[in-house]
Amino acid sequence: MKRSVLIGLLVLVLATVAGGIWGLGSAPVDTEAAFDFDIDALRAAALASGEPLPVAMEQFIVARGSFPRAVVVAGSGLFASQEMVFRTHILGYEDGRTVLVDPVHSRAVHEKNFGGQFNEKTWNFMQDAMQDASLVLATHEHLDHINGIAAAPAFAQLAPKVMLTREQLDNQRFIRDAGFTAEQLEALTPLEYDGAYSPMPGIAVKKTPGHSLGHQVIYVQLANGEEYLFAGDIAWAWDNIREQRGRARLVSKLFLDEDQQQVAAQLAGLKTLAEEGRINLVVSHDLP
């Protein structure tokens, strides 16, 4: 049974029992305790080398699916659905170097867990792009963001370019769920850092545990001055940010093992950034 269908059935069951109201709620957002993403520190780290910045950023939608909206945005209608896009981004430099962010899962994983459309041609293009990339990054260790690495036909050639963090690789439940073998994990060198860290010019990362133990945001500044923050799965939908409501507790605790209070603080921080309007937020599974 697909994970999305199982989640939907569990939601409907919970809605009919005494615990339903609790299970479909989320942690309250305290705007006074909003998480500080420290964009100044991320910006400084990204620009510290003084080297040329990326000149382009493209997105590629590999697959689409849907979850019950009450799961995605707690307190929403039980019988409405929320489309989920599964996409990867490629950053390009003038000299031809590229960085790939969040390699999407394979068709087999999509059919088992999500259902919906899957573009095999785009997935194959992503695989070729990873082989050509200088670096592969992930916002976190859930299968829809890193199974594209584990399922790579030429993993041995790809491994030296993959930069997963110590926290991501040590989260055994989700690393196994993403399809990595023991041999593959041995071939990867964990990234260990504190604060804001820049793996390449114009890019910086910062740890934001909550949705997962290894969650991080990725800041990008392009040569034209545009700034982006890959928010990963802090929010599954823009309405999580706009309405300041996270995922339903049922999914948050049972399937994701989230720290809902951390996520709530981060949602408040993302709303502040969105209202300021200087940073373009990238919400992984929702389009602006």
Image (cartoon, grey):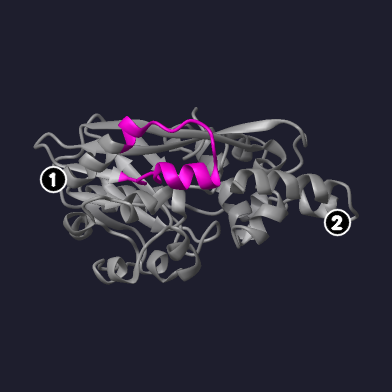
Q: Seen in the image, is 147 located left or right of residue 245?
A: left
Instruction: Write the residue at 26% across / 35% down.
Output: 125
Looking at this view, is 55 or 119 the one in front? 119
| Residue drawn at x 46%, y 57% as measured from the top left | 215
The residue lying at 34 percent from left, 36 percent from top is 227
Q: Give coordinates of residue 72: x percent, y percent.
A: 64, 42
Residue 55 position, x and y percent, is: 20, 32
- Measuring 25% from the left and 50% from the top, which residue is drawn there? 153
Identify the residue position indicated by label 1 in the image. Answer: 51
| Discs 2, 1 touching: Cβ within 8 Å | no
What amino acid is at disc 1?
Answer: Glu
Relative to 84, is 161 above or below?
A: below
Q: Viewer-proximal residue, 94 or 71?
A: 71
In the image, residue 15 sits, relative to residue 242, either above or below, namely below
Q: Which of the two discs, 2 and 1, sits closer to the camera?
A: 2
Circle on res. 192: none
Q: How crowded is mark 1: few (under 14 residues within 10 Å), some or many (20 or more)?
A: few
- The amino acid type of the residue labelled 2 equals Gly
Which portion, as a residue range, is magenta? Answer: 101-123
Position in image of residue 267 (x %, y %): 58, 47
- Does dot 2 land on a helix, a strand or a loop? loop
Q: Residue 19 carries which label?
A: 2
Figure check: 116 above or below 208:
above
What is the quadrant of residue 252 in the picture?
Answer: bottom right
* Of pointers 2 and 1, the one earlier in the residue sequence: 2
Dot 2, crowdedness within 10 Å: few (<14), some or many (≥20)?
few
